[in-house]
Image (cartoon, helix red, strand yellow):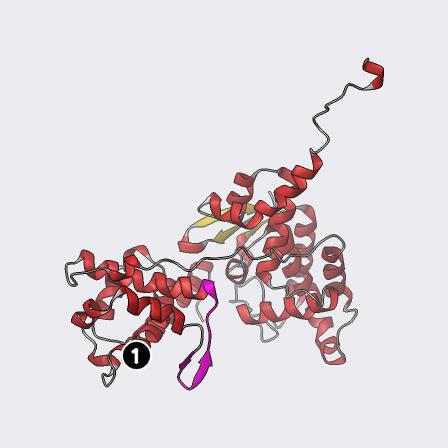
Amino acid sequence: MAKTDGSDYYRERNLKNLDKIDSLLEELPYFCEDFLRGVETRTSTLTRLNYVYDLRIFFDFLVRKKFRGKDVHDLTLEDMDAVTDTDLEIYLSYLSNYRFRDRRLSCDERAKARKLSTVRSMYKYFFNKGLIETNNASKVATPKLHEKEIIRLEGGEVPSLLKTAEYGDGLSKHAIGYHEKTKIRDTAILTLFLGTGIRISELVGLNDESIDFSNNSFVVTRKGGNQAILYFSEEVGDALAAYLAQKEEDPSVPSDEHALFLSLQYRRISVRAVENLVKKYARIVSPLKKITPHKLRSTYGTALYRETGDIYIVADVLGHRDVNTTRKHYAAITEDHRRSVANAVKLHADANEE
């Protein structure tokens, strides 16, 4: 078996996405393939896959509500030209409660905004190509997005989470049976999330060779495929070193498997498995919060902003392309700073200064 490096992991993930896209295109009108090809150079395979998922629902709406009696495969660009901005507003309303493939579904405001963005991208592409005469999608307002409360671990919840992973307190009898085998790995994963703010896709894609203990750094592949070097603390380094030492002593670890974090089957751990292990420990420590790997990332981002007060550093470390994304997520924390300086300006002279 050939050795697997980080680039192979992302290449295989992209190939799987492309296979899904090819399969789903068979369910869509002929012109969708042209659209996806046209945006290929400026989008990731995951973005295009999400486009396909969104467009399935859009075209299903059209044949149910606008072009009754037509099949999705029969839709043409002339039909797209006949779709009005009012039709698209009806579509957004429809998404509040709709049926697709015998399932009753609903979209919140963010899901509606994303689906509208997909339709806009398609209309913009064909309008710019001169293949449709009007771009009615550009006339439809994006649903108002309300700020979501930042859910994160606070205060003593962080050490409690790590302690739970290390010792297994509160786990079910079934979970305890596996805990002895996974506790060092799980502690390393949680420590890495909480100590660096790494994304779950970045964590899963790490290899043994990604870690450089000489300067406490590691290489991650960011969104869009760009690589970046991140740095970690001694606490994180200790957790990673303990896990790597355990792997070196385990004769069952395949010599040709380079993935850093392995499943119990000694293969690269999956995103779903990481999500499940975070949920398993977090619901013991903070049962009223729905803690996910992304919430651990938010916990780190919050702590880093509180310590530095520098939104640009937080944006750089978290890998946000636009600092406004960071500001949107962590602006609420500025309340701490506002409170801390409330008494900084004195209106009356101190008694001993008079």
Write down the region rendered in magenta.
Answer: 98-110
Left or right relative to 272: residue 15: left
* Residue 74 pos. (x, y %): 20, 80
Characterize the local packing of mark 1: few (<14), some (14-19) or many (20 or more) Cα atoms within 10 angstroms. some
- Residue 158 seen in the figure: yes
Left or right: 60 as drawn, with respect to 313? left
Three-letter residue code for mark 1: Lys
* 80 or 218, nearer to the observer: 80
State which quadrant residue 339 falls in.
top right
Q: Which residue is mark 1?
A: 65
Name the image quarter holding residue 266.
bottom right
**Residue 47 part of the magenta-drawn span:** no
Q: Is residue 101 magenta?
A: yes
Residue 20, horizontal then vertical, whole percent: 36, 74
Quarter the N terminus occupies: bottom left
Front residue of this view, candidates 317 and 110: 110
Identified at 59% across, 68% down, the residue is 275
**Quadrant, the C terminus:** top right
**Quarter-of-image position of residue 279:** bottom right
Return the residue found at the far top: 354
What kind of element bears circle 1? helix
The vertical placement of 120 against 66, above or below, is: above
- Residue at 81% x, 19% y is 350
Residue 264 position within the rendered picture, expressed as x and y whole percent measured from the top left = 62, 74
Residue at image coords 36%, 58%: 141
Q: Which of the two residues, 140 or 287, is positioned nearer the viewer here?
A: 140
